[in-house]
Image: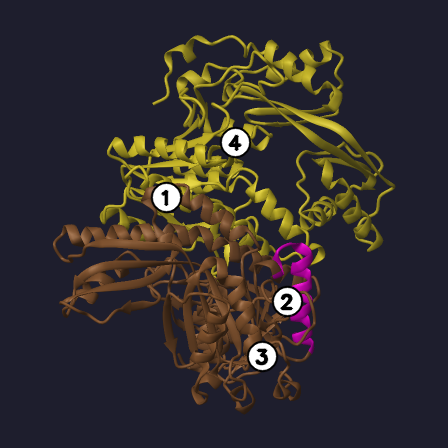
Chain colours: A yellow, B brown
Amino acid sequence: MQQLASDIAVLKFGGTSVGDLKRLTQAAMRVRRQVDLGRKVIVIVSAMAGETNRLAERARSFGIAFDAREYDAVVASGENVTAGLLALALQGMNVPARSWQGWQVPVHTCSAHGAARIIDIGVENLTARFSDGMKVAVVAGFQGVGDDNRITTLGRGGSDLSAVAFAARFGSNKCFIYTDVDGVYTADPRIVPRARKLDRIAYDEMLELAALGAKVLQARSVELAMQYKVPVHVLSSFSDSSGTLVCEEDQTMELRTISGIAHSRDEAKVTIVSVADRPGIAASIFGALALRNINVDMIIQNVSESGRTDITFSCPVEEVDTAEHALRTIRDDGILNFEALLHDREVCKISVVGIGMRSQSGVAARMFTALADEGINIQVISTSEIKISVLVNRRYLELAVQTLHEKFGLDRVPDCDHQQQPA
Amino acid sequence: MQQLASDIAVLKFGGTSVGDLKRLTQAAMRVRRQVDLGRKVIVIVSAMAGETNRLAERARSFGIAFDAREYDAVVASGENVTAGLLALALQGMNVPARSWQGWQVPVHTCSAHGAARIIDIGVENLTARFSDGMKVAVVAGFQGVGDDNRITTLGRGGSDLSAVAFAARFGSNKCFIYTDVDGVYTADPRIVPRARKLDRIAYDEMLELAALGAKVLQARSVELAMQYKVPVHVLSSFSDSSGTLVCEEDQTMELRTISGIAHSRDEAKVTIVSVADRPGIAASIFGALALRNINVDMIIQNVSESGRTDITFSCPVEEVDTAEHALRTIRDDGILNFEALLHDREVCKISVVGIGMRSQSGVAARMFTALADEGINIQVISTSEIKISVLVNRRYLELAVQTLHEKFGLDRVPDCDHQQQPA
């Protein structure tokens, strides 16, 4: 995707931020403030809170014959409505604004309906209209148009992706994501009352946190922001606090060992007992699971003895039945041989995330010791360069998060954070 | 508009006919019956009952800065949702169906947002997909796309217009309008319990009835049907009765003197007292009213004496204030001089309609006598070739309709109707 350079601000408002007419008006006021600063503005809007679910439920009620293209055409209408309404609200404040649906921009995507990827965003139409005096383009988020001129959607949280993609394409370094929380926290404040808001966080930390279930920003949007170096400001629609800036890492961030504790509640663990330990077996297992769209997360294979081994993987708890059905099918087809399938639907995932981990050893040991001191048994471990995740029994979720938050000193404000203010 | 010849059936379902998921399923079953007859089907759908009002209310809540383009983008989404849902319902019955939004077909319109006229309907996309095996195209009614690629709507009742336009363009002689009444009646059955359903009615009779407030078919759709000679079957979604066929007149219709009694409840009468009786005055009055979109209906100018005259016109009761404001403005601007404005907001319009009137004299006399016998004072009279309308005080509405229905023998089944069955 080519990038322009511009003084365009991109603002994104999530569903609760445009949830009723009063909130739409408040969103319009935030947009007007950007216009008053002399900026042109692209606003990405979600459907009003509850609309997408309402539409999705209706579409799903026709059951077996589910056609993702029709589903997309139905659910994308929620964003179209918000876009038109916000344009009207802005006009009511004498701000020259108009709405744009995905196909009007156009936002070209692939044809993977329900989870389409943005291929390119046409800049000519918006640029021409900005030259003609339009101050604000209100764009329906979450949607695009495929090669066959049919409406596509980008998957849940796709409006974040729309916002970052527009910022990247229009060369904007002002991408403001307005949501119902006031930033990214060191842990979920509902579990850890002393959790602190982070002023800044690096893309890859945010990526780990987003993927791990911190619902502030959609993971794909963080990837895209990292790829195009778009600084993303996460802000609250309901306060004027400074939010969190998601950006490239800097020295101050590296002084922190750990930036946050993430958790994911509804995990399950499946173990395939005694499979042959030879090349191609893992490929046939995880190929079959991928075909059924099982979101496999952690994978462990124990050291093999006697030519057979156990393979364990984790996935969302609601996908266990489909996963086991897929595995039994390839056994019945003679592709895979195993003794038994075991599952545990009562696990959760706890992760510590921080780019400081790269330069500091012993983080894993500190994490495991802290959990052991509380008598929490670790079932599965998985690590990346800046993250350590463990599966534990779900009843320890709160205890584990609170313990780690305290042990890694996340409730104390580090000196460097005092000196950092978001741009 | 060019016409193809084809064995395509066009079915239109109004808002109550797709008002919930159960009714959508019933509509899908009607569509499938057409497919089972070997026909390709174009289905035109309205928004689910209540949706358009809900969306329109939200759009209007932003008040003064009303932009018809944004309004159209918002309200058109209701039809898009129904189209997707009905396509899913059909797929669930193993009928190959897909949804089409106005811009996807495309339905080209002029850019008069809120009341756009259809310029042409592209046939290539639908034709290609029919060749590929699609059996049903579910088209979002009421909408199109303007030259500037923005979504337009055709005005209230516009889905009827969409249906007739598709039937005309695709050369279909099977245009079925499914609605919540089972046909066209000799009068409103809520006022005249003995009103009878008509098996057939001529285009121009239907046009007078539609324009006069019989809400079965939108007036513009009848004009278009007449222009392209599309026979239109009005049918109930909720029964299997034979409905009413709107078609070219035939001998049997001409045997009837009067086909129906129409009424319009919320009329008002405005009189401009003592205006100069010279060329250009009427033009300046009705020009000023047209500028404000006042729907002027009947106009009377009395014979002038002493160079000054009174001009009376009727319009919908909710437009009286705007009309008077427009007239006072042109008086203040020195364009028009008058002594006073009088209005009466308590009138209604009663009309007798029938193509038989052309060959039978004395209809007006019979009408006026019937009303006089009941002591009903006629305030304004207006006639066309097949219609006589009068304004009377609103409290006589029911009495006038019932009296005329009886006096013109509409509650008796004429012999010719017995022999006529709809095709």
Q: Residues within 10 Å of mark 2 (few under 14, many from 20)?
A: few
Mark 1 or mark 4: which is in front? 1
Q: In this view, does B69 lie above or below A247?
A: below
Give the structural element (helix, strand or loop) at label 3.
loop
Q: Which of marks 1 and 4 is nearer the N terminus?
A: 1
Mark 3 or mark 2: which is in front? 3
Quadrant location of the C terminus of chain A? top left
Q: Main secondary structure of the magenta part?
A: helix
Q: Is residue B108 left or right of residue A206?
A: left
Identify the residue under disc 3: B409
Mark 4 or mark 3: which is in front? 3
Identify the residue under disc 4: A207
In the image, which disc is placed on residue B258? none
Identify the residue under disc 2: B193
Q: Position of residue A182 (x, y in %)?
A: 47, 23
Q: Distance between the residues labelled 2 and 1?
A: 49 Å
Name which residue type carries label 3: Gly
Q: How far apart are marks 3 and 2 (CA)?
A: 14 Å
Q: How crowded is mark 1: few (under 14 residues within 10 Å), some or many (20 or more)?
A: many
